[in-house]
Amino acid sequence: MRVPLTGYAEVMSHPSVTSAAEFSPHVLREYALLADGERGALVGPRGNFCWLCVPHWDSDAIFSALVGGPGCFAVTPDDRFVWGGQYEPGSLIWRSRWVTEKGITECREALAFPGDQHRAVMLRRVRPDDAPARLRVVLEAAAGFGHHRMTRIRQEDDGVWTGRTGPLYVRISGAGMLEPGGLGHPDHVLAGLLRVRRDQQHDLVLEIGDEPFDDDPPDPDRTWRTTERAWQQAVPDLSDTLAARDATHAAAVITGMTSTGGGMVAAASMSLPERADLGRNYDYRYVWIRDQCFAGQAVEAAVGAHPLLDAAVAFVSARICEDGPRLKPAYTVRGDAVPDERRITLPGYPGGYDVAGNHVNAQFQLDTLGESLLLLAAASRQDRLDADGWRAVEVAASAIEKRWGEAEAGIWELDDEHWTESRLICVAGLKSVCAAGAPAHRMAEWTALADGILADTARRCVHPGGWWQRAPGDARPDAALLLPALRGALAADDPRTVATLDAVEAELAEDNFVYRFRHRPGPLADEEGAFLLCGFMMALAKHQQGDQIAAIRYFERNRSACGPPGLFSEEYDVHQRQMRGNLPQAFVHAALLETAARLSGARG
């Protein structure tokens, strides 16, 4: 039986039932990100939106198939196919491309941008190339990590369905082919078969929000045009950087992960294991102050003054002025405290288990104060630091003076210790704000404070071999200790800078990838993946030493550690050539952007 629909789609009978295994997890390299600043969706090669939290980044997921839960929005060819795809330049508009036995079909996909804080709008435009397309469409909205099924499902006008799932409202237009229980699914799932004629197109628009719909569904053409223009205006021109396409994509990822309030989440996902079956599963859907500072400094290095720099400064300044010496390492995008870590009763991504919240909320990390000063100094250099920003500088410097002698968790969020990197980054931050226009009556005070911290750290944390060691009682090198010299804590030609670079490369580098530190004797890869942030830092350190060939080798090696969508996770399994950890990891994209800019010499 065929039922005509508006446009170029029609319902077709279909004898099979879509199996749950069809939307089982893939390796991370095959996922693309759609983001609108307020939340992000991960879409897999079968056209399945398998991860989405609404209304906010850190809300409970409504699509949680990625981590073993129910919930997805899938548009999948009803035939054997191979997958590909690409982002439209300078945006997070993704084009899934499927080559089937009968022809080629593309599905253009995006979250309407910029995003509404209360409503996610998902745009999907199916366009066959040279032959008619048949696709299965499945919508299972399951709020609360799958706790709530979709209820109150009813058809409004032709092609528009509405429903509820827990506290959320659902509406999908262009979906007259769907029916509750279609294609053999349970009644709380909308499913059906879509057919689109050759050289025509069909639009699906899915809205999910925490407020009732009191308006008409969005017009697809108008919403697409608005989204295209917004991306064109938001992402800077990076044509003069090294690897300009990847640098531009990194800026787009950072843009998509930055909310209206200025906060940039560390990652779009949670609970993707860094190492299978070792319990290292974390929730990164929050704003880490350090990561936000990395991103702001990267943008300043690449383009100078830019709204992304302003956003970072606004968010970090507000947190410093509110919390002062009690500054937390991370916050929600709304500036609230990160909730305590808790287990979620889902199977998890294979090799992991599901947790929400993060234990970082109980830590003090001294280096966040130093990184904050580095960000604020970058803004001052671009004449983008207002009175509130300078007040934040005062508060951060005072907090460093008060707390620099305390044990703390450090950049890697470990047990409390007097971590060398944290202290040296505070030195760099103090020096940087002094050089960037600090008030005259503060310069002598802050310079003396920096000198005092440096002298004490040198007395306690220089290894007999001449390099900076991790802590007074820990003689191992640490890749994080490349960063202080890059940020100006010490000169590039300081013997300790050179010795540290040599020690890190000798002990922690493998095939131009770099590990954080050596956990115990044996192969580095036995304990964790290479840390991509550290690989890009090594490229910058080699560049600082004038070794441009080595710098480019590290840069090229580490920017290869992604899949077709060009997204990076935190770690990379060098031997298995697989991405590990949450996706995408914003600070890796920031590091790529900064390295591409500095190695090109585009801005001096």
Image: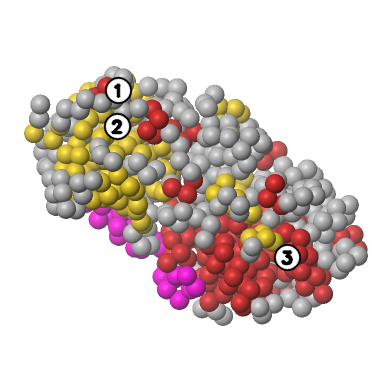
In the image, residue 209 sits, relative to residue 125, either above or below, namely above
Of residues 288 and 32, the one drawn nearer to the viewer in this rendering: 32
Give residue 568's position: percent from left, percent from top.
52, 53
Q: Depth check: 27 or 236 in front?
A: 27
Residue that mark 2 sits on: 138
> Mark 2, residues whose alpha carbon is within 10 Å: few (<14), some, or many (≥20)?
many
Camera-side mark, 2 or 3: 3
N-term-proximal mark, 3 vs 1: 1
Give the residue at x 31% y 31%.
139
The structure residue drawn at horizontal position 53% and vertical position 72%, both measured from the top left corner, is 597
x, y (%) of residue 238? 44, 71
The kind of residue on which mark 3 rests is Glu
> Residue 360: x percent and y percent?
67, 41
Q: Tell me if label 2 and label 1 are in contact, CB under 8 Å.
A: yes
Which residue in the rendered view is the most extreme toward the front? 101
Image quarter for residue 275?
A: top right
Label placed on residue 505: 3
- Residue 194, image quadrant: top left
- Give the total of numbered labels: 3
Is 233 magenta? The answer is: yes
Instruction: Identify the magenta region.
Output: 222-244
Which part of the image, by quadrant, shows the C terminus?
Answer: bottom right
Q: Is residue 464 left or right of residue 255?
A: right
